[in-house]
């Protein structure tokens, strides 16, 4: 009998399905989330029922199973995910999994907007996007998410849930950014988008600097600054804006009341509460404490 485990960590959810040999499973994946599906211990076939207007199939690489090993999929989009590989999915209303020999599927879901600004993300359509090159983070992320989901969530503190949510989001961003960069030729426009990707993925690192961001996208800092200037922005200002926005979200969410302003500052890359307060002022916000108090008074 197929087994199922599900756990939620803030905006992140993890679903683990153990499928017996020669069985299938219906998945209800919402349209407001990005889903990473990982096959462990066997191969999976993902089958989408036809949507109005049709779908575009992305064929899997590698050997395909014999025709008599899978249920008939005529008229439907089907892709194979081999053991140890993964696929990105979103905007799916109707998806089925099939396995011939039995395996475990790990489905990690994060808000769609988390990666919506990453260059190349729009390429993930209604059909599964198989992850070329098997990103280094894929299996460690699946193992971490699986262990967290199987833990005792009822006794987890708000702080623990926050850390799990944060780690999974960061790893998902890394996988999406890796996939989007495959087989792309770097152009000045791409360098700007890649710099935004770096900021989105690494803003919590207090050592992240304009020089390091530029080096990551293979440009000099002066060249990259010019690209930002053409858009009325700067590297440093964009990094500050992202950090402040992330801090503001945490301060207004009562789930994270256990985190002090100083701790939230550290989580978004600042050394302490005073540095965060200065950044808030530069971005036109009230003080962090005033923002948190106002959110609580309005709730």
Image (cartoon, rainbow, N blue to C red):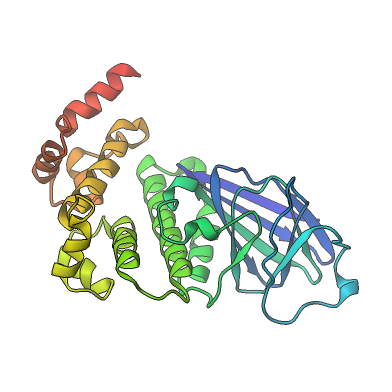
Q: How many marks?
A: 0
Residue located at (38% from left, 46% from top): 162
Residue 42 at x, y = what percent?
Answer: 71, 72
Residue 284 at x, y = what percent?
Answer: 15, 34
User: Looking at the picture, does residue 220 appear above or below residue 271?
Assistant: below
Quadrant in which the N terminus appears = bottom right
**Residue 74's quadrant in the figure?**
bottom right
User: Looking at the picture, does residue 155 appear above or below residue 47?
Assistant: above
Relative horizontal placement of residue 40, taking residue 155 as reference (left or right): right
**Residue 18's quadrant in the figure?**
bottom right
Residue 247 at x, y = what percent?
Answer: 26, 41
Relative horizontal placement of residue 96, taking residue 8 as reference (left or right): right
Quadrant in which the C terminus appears = top left
**Residue 286's quadrant in the figure?**
top left
Residue located at (69% from left, 45% from top): 93
For this orientation, the residue located farthest to the right is 68
Residue located at (12% from left, 39% from top): 277
Tell me, yes or no, if residue 208 can be seen here: no
Tell me, yes or no, if residue 159 can be seen here: yes
User: Looking at the picture, does residue 40 appear above or below residue 14?
Assistant: below
For this orientation, the residue located farthest to the bottom is 63
Seen from the viewer's position, the closer of residues 121 and 111 is 121
Residue 224 at x, y = what percent?
Answer: 20, 66
For this orientation, the residue located farthest to the front is 230
User: Looking at the picture, does residue 182 appear above or below residue 50?
Assistant: below
Relative horizontal placement of residue 182, taking residue 27 as reference (left or right): left
Seen from the viewer's position, the closer of residues 261 and 249 is 249
């Amino acid at each position: 009998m197929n087994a199922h485990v599900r756990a939620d960590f803030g905006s992140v959810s993890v679903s683990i399905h153990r499928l017996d040999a020669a069985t299938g499973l219906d998945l209800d994946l919402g349209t407001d989330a990005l889903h990473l599906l990982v096959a462990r211990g066997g191969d999976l076939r993902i089958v989408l029922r036809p949507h109005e207007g049709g779908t575009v199939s992305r064929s899997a690489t590698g050997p395909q199973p014999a025709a008599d090993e899978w249920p008939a999929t005529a008229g439907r989009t089907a892709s194979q995910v081999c053991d140890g590989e993964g696929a990105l999915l979103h905007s799916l209303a109707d998806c089925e999994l099939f396995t011939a020999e039995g395996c475990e599927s790990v489905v990690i879901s994060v808000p769609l907007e988390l990666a919506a600004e990453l260059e190349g993300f729009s390429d993930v359509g209604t059909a599964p996007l198989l992850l070329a090159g098997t990103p280094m983070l894929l299996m460690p992320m699946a193992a971490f998410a699986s262990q967290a989901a199987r833990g005792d969530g009822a006794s987890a503190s708000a702080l623990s849930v926050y850390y799990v949510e944060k780690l999974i989001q960061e790893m998902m961003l890394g996988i999406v950014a890796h996939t989007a960069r495959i087989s792309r030729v770097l152009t000045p426009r791409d360098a700007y988008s890649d710099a935004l990707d770096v900021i989105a993925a690494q803003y919590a690192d207090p050592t992240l600097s304009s020089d390091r961001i530029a080096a990551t996208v293979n440009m000099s800092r002066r060249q990259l600054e010019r690209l930002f200037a053409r858009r009325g922005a700067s590297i440093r200002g964009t990094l500050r804006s992202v950090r402040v926005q992330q801090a503001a979200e945490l301060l207004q969410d009562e789930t994270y009341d256990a985190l002090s302003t100083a701790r939230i500052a550290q989580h978004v890359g600042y050394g302490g509460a005073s540095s965060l307060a200065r950044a808030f002022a530069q971005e036109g916000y009230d003080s962090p404490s005033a923002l948190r108090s106002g959110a609580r008074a309005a709730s």
